[in-house]
């Protein structure tokens, strides 16, 4: 059955790819014309992760407009359409009066396991709510505009085991089977609260305050657990000893339209439930070079290389991607459009950590994403106005664990309602690192994402 699914999906991809190649010149011309007034897919800064509050708000507001396209979703009107329209109208009035804009999204994941460890849970369900907002209070509309940005998260579980823990507990997986669908105590936390200033037009930008490093280092618009792939190994760069949300600074230079340079300094003791211990002097530092190597369209993403160092935590305890030990490493991502219309994108990732300082000693992955795979003609802006299919292979050498593990994922995402996307996903976990008695496990998932 697994091989049949892969074969049929591959056949559909090849069919669309051949059609795309046959009319490549015309498609390229049409795509470039359609993009003339569109916003760059990489977002308004140095990061493209949809979990980053700046990018997330940017994408929510784009989605509001593009969801009005006739025939965009399977069902053009949802039971909540009237309520959503009134809420959006109220938000617009608030912005006109106060320069405050905000957006909300709700994500829910249903996940079941097969070939599980006997006696462990086989099903998990969890919801993840984010509220993001900015106050455009300084030099509004200018290239050096300054703003206060807030990112509030709420996470809660609907059963005994949340989906993020499910694959680890039920299969013994170190690639995990979902991210970031876990539970918070308390339920709502402020993950980001920072002052942001600058822009691509100004040639520079910076943030200072409460920041989240894994939302801007090694990011891609095509690799995000809320809209594309699910497992931690397939969405995170945890061969980096990434600290948690905490006090720090992130900034960079837009050297030209194809090259950026970014850097970060933040608290290595950071903890999303408090303000960390910056006074202890333990720091996480990183520098990242971003470049569009062979862009085909204006939506091309950046390839990136990141060098990092973590001083470790004060008491040696693990936090987020850091094991608590001092160490360093390197992480690389190569991202490339594979067709002239930019619908098919290939991404390769590899990272290496040293001194047992990160969750993974080594991590490697290959990703393919294909927008509008069934040729419905809905492709306009990546990630916003198109069906999407993806496949990925992830390999990890988890720090201190007895054997390597691999994960294969296949997913398909489509707009169910104008502002609600549904994603179905199948994962195969090969040689679970914590379960030497098993050589294979699997997970099937349904994810729903609604934006306001």
Image (tube, helix red, strand yellow):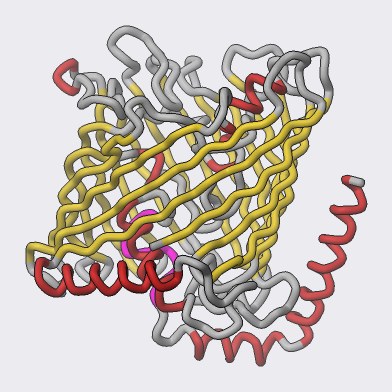
Q: Specify whether residue 40 is painted magenta.
A: yes
Residue under the image location 79 percent in, 29 percent down: 441
- Please identify the quarter of the rendering in which residue 277 is found: top left
Task: Tell me where residue 267 sits by quadrant.
Answer: top left
Please tell me which residue is depicted at 21% across the width and 44% down the height of the picture: 193
Query: Which of 212/310 is in front?
Result: 212
Residue depicted at 68% across the width and 22% down the height:
121
In the displayed structure, does residue 50 sit left or right of residue 199? right
- 161 lies above or below 233: above
| Residue found at the very far left of the displayed protein | 138
Please determine whether, in this image, residue 343 is positioned above or below residue 190: below
Looking at the magenta stretch, what is its main secondary structure? Answer: loop
Please provide percent x and percent y for residue 123: 67, 31
How many numbered marks appear? 0
- Residue 174: percent from left, percent from top: 63, 24
Name the quarter where the C terminus is drawn. bottom left
Q: Which quarter of the figure has residue 227?
A: bottom right
Q: Is residue 333 left or right of residue 219?
A: right
Q: Quick check: 422 above or below 207?
A: below
Q: Assess whether residue 283 is covered by the magenta stretch.
A: no
Where residue 51 appears, x then y in whole percent?
A: 41, 49
User: Relative to the observer, which residue lies in front, 148 or 450?
Assistant: 450
The magenta segment is: 39-47
Foreground of the two, 384 or 345: 384
What residue sits 44% from the left and 70% below the top? 63
Looking at the picture, how far across and down is residue 450, in whole percent?
A: 48, 58
């Amino acid at each position: 059955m697994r091989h049949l699914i892969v074969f049929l999906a591959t056949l559909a991809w090849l069919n669309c790819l051949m059609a795309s190649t046959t009319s490549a010149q015309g498609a390229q011309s049409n795509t470039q014309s359609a993009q003339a007034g569109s916003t760059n897919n990489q977002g308004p800064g140095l990061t493209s992760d949809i979990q980053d509050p700046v990018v997330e708000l940017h994408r929510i507001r784009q989605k509001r407009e593009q969801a009005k396209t006739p025939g965009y979703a399977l069902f053009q009107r949802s039971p909540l359409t009237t309520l959503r329209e009134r809420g959006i109208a109220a938000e617009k009035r608030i912005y006109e009066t106060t320069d405050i804009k905000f957006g909300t999204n709700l994500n829910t994941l249903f996940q079941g396991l097969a070939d599980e460890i006997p006696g462990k849970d086989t099903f998990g369900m969890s919801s993840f709510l984010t509220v993001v907002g900015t106050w455009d209070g300084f030099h509004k509309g200018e290239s050096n505009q300054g703003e206060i940005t807030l990112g509030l998260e709420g996470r809660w579980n609907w059963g005994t085991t949340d989906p993020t823990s499910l694959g680890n507990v039920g299969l013994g997986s170190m690639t995990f089977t979902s991210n970031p669908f876990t539970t918070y105590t308390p339920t709502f936390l402020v993950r980001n609260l920072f002052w942001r200033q600058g822009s691509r037009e100004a040639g520079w930008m910076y943030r200072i305050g409460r920041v989240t490093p894994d939302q801007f280092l090694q990011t891609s618009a095509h690799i995000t657990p809320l809209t594309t792939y699910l497992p931690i190994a397939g969405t995170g760069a945890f061969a980096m000893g990434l600290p948690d949300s905490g006090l720090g600074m992130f900034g960079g230079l837009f050297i030209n339209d194809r090259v950026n340079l970014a850097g970060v300094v933040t608290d290595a003791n950071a903890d999303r439930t408090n303000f960390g211990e910056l006074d202890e002097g333990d720091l996480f530092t990183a520098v990242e070079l971003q470049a569009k190597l062979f862009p085909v369209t204006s939506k091309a993403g950046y390839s990136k290389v990141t060098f990092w160092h973590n001083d470790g935590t004060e008491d040696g305890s693990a936090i987020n991607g850091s094991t608590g030990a001092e160490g360093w490493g390197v992480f690389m991502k190569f991202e490339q459009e594979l067709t002239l219309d930019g619908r098919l994108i290939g991404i390769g990732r590899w990272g290496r950590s040293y001194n047992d300082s990160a969750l993974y000693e080594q991590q490697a992955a290959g990703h393919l994403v294909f927008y509008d795979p069934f040729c419905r003609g809905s492709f306009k802006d990546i990630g916003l106005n198109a069906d999407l299919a993806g496949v990925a292979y992830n390999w990890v050498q988890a720090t201190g664990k007895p054997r390597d593990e691999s994960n294969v994922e296949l997913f398909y995402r489509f707009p169910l309602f104008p502002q609600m996307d549904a994603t179905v996903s199948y994962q195969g976990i090969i040689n679970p690192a914590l379960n030497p008695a098993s050589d294979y496990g699997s997970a099937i998932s349904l994810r729903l994402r609604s934006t306001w």
